[in-house]
Amino acid sequence: MSASTEAVALLSESPVLVAPALLQALDLSPHPVPAWITDEAVRDSIRDGLIDIPDDLLRGPS
């Protein structure tokens, strides 16, 4: 297989899924805003990544 054939083979494969937590940690995806936060300024700050909500507060009750 030549180099160009290998590149085409690599590009034609289905995309790799990256863990959502990794994308969020790298600020490459929107930050989830819990429904219980009603102050719009705080919600905007969370969306912008200025306020970090701990994971245990984002999960529903177990």
Image (cartoon, rainbow, N blue to C red):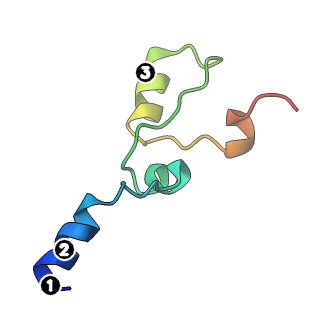
Q: Residues within 10 Å of mark 3 (few under 14, many from 20)?
A: few
Name the front one of labels 3 and 2.
Answer: 2
- Compared across the picture, whether 39 is left or right of 57 comes to left
Do the CB atoms of the residues marked 1 and 2 lie less than 8 Å apart?
yes
Q: Dot 3: what SS?
A: helix
- As drawn, the residue found furthest toward the front would be 1
Residue 19, percent from left and from top: 53, 54
Task: Tell me which residue sits at (55%, 44%) in the image.
Answer: 52
* N-term mark: 3 or 2: 2
Residue at screen point 75% across, 42% down? 56
- CA–CA distance between discs 1 and 2? 6 Å
Please identify the residue farthest to the bottom as the structure is shown: 2
Q: Are marks 3 and 2 in contact (CB under 8 Å)?
A: no
User: Badge 1, how many Cα within 10 Å: few under 14, some, many 20+?
Assistant: few
* In this rendering, position of residue 20 left or right of residue 59: left
Location of residue 61 with respect to 8 vertically, above or below: above
Judged left or right of residue 6, residue 41 is right
Q: Which mark is residue 22?
A: none
Residue named by callout 3: 41
Dot label at residue 3: 1
| Residue beneath disc 2 | 7
Discs 3/1, front: 1
Q: Amino acid at mark 1?
A: Ala
Total tally of numbered discs in the picture: 3
Give how far apart the Cα atoms at labels 3 and 2 are: 47 Å
Residue type for callout 3 = Ala
Q: What residue lies at 41% left-to-right and 37% top-to-bottom? A: 30
Q: How far across and how far down the image is residue 45, in percent?
A: 42, 32
Q: Quadrant of the N terminus?
A: bottom left
